[in-house]
Image: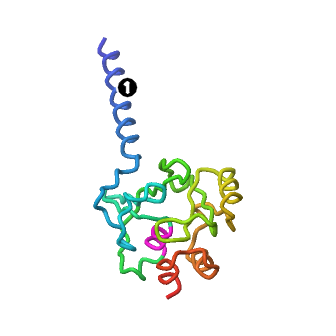
Amino acid sequence: MRRTIGVILFALAVEITAMAQVGIAQPLQIAPDAQCPVCGMYPARYPKFNCEIIFQDGSYEALDSAQCLFIYLLFPEKINVRLKPVSRIYFKNYLNAKWLAAGKTFFVVGSTITGPMGPEFIAVDSVDTARLVKESGRGKEIIPYSKVTRSYMTKAAGKGWLHYLAKTIVLR
């Protein structure tokens, strides 16, 4: 009997831990008054484009566009940011405004679809969906999250695929 109770308690503890981890792994609700640390806009006003970085200490930054997020991560010295260890990154799927984990995100770049400040990286959940968005929005490229680097951002700035503020920060 004691062994059965012990097994049940152990299983319950594992289940509670798993449930807590699932809760932790979720994106955070962006506060209406949260400002983008790059441009100063209010990400909650742009549900198709907002994104967030969750840090290991539990704090987060809300950003109004993928371009602002990449500037924050890849060019912190240009915006006077001291990066903290990152836990998770999320983008909003342009088509349904649902959260996407960074590693599962593809971007359509150089399209006629504009975001809060102009040309934007359009976040979607698969390469197939990205192809459809690229065709309908006359996009130039599809790139997975893992391939967006400082050099890619510089290339995008040179081709006119970044909004004015992002281009200015990247090229200075």
**Residue lying at 52% horizontally and 56% vertically, measured from the top left:** 102
36 inside magenta stretch? no
Residue 93 to residue 159: above or below: above
Q: Between residues 103 and 128, which one lies in front from this camera angle?
A: 128
Q: Between residues 165 and 62, which one lies in front from this camera angle?
A: 165
The N terminus, quarter of image:
top left
Q: Please, which residue is most extreme toward the top here?
A: 1
Q: Between residues 110 and 3, which one lies in front from this camera angle?
A: 110
Q: Quadrant of residue 13?
A: top left
Q: Where is residue 62 drawn, in percent x and y? A: 37, 61
Q: Quadrant of residue 124?
A: bottom right
Dot 1: element: helix
Residue 89 to residue 141: above or below: above
- Residue assigned mark 1: 11
**Residue lying at 52% horizontally and 71% vertically, measured from the top left:** 118
Q: Where is residue 128 drawn, in percent x and y? A: 69, 50
Residue 11 to residue 84: above or below: above
Chain part drawn in magenta: 67-74
70 inside magenta stretch? yes
Q: As shown in the figure, which amino acid type bears the numbered disc 1? A: Ala
**Residue lying at 35% horizontally and 36% vertically, measured from the top left:** 17
Query: In the drawing, does residue 8 fall left or right of residue 157?
Result: left
**Residue lying at 38% horizontally and 30% vertically, measured from the top left:** 15
Q: Residues within 10 Å of mark 1 (few under 14, many from 20)?
A: few
Please name the predominant secondary structure of the magenta segment in the image: helix
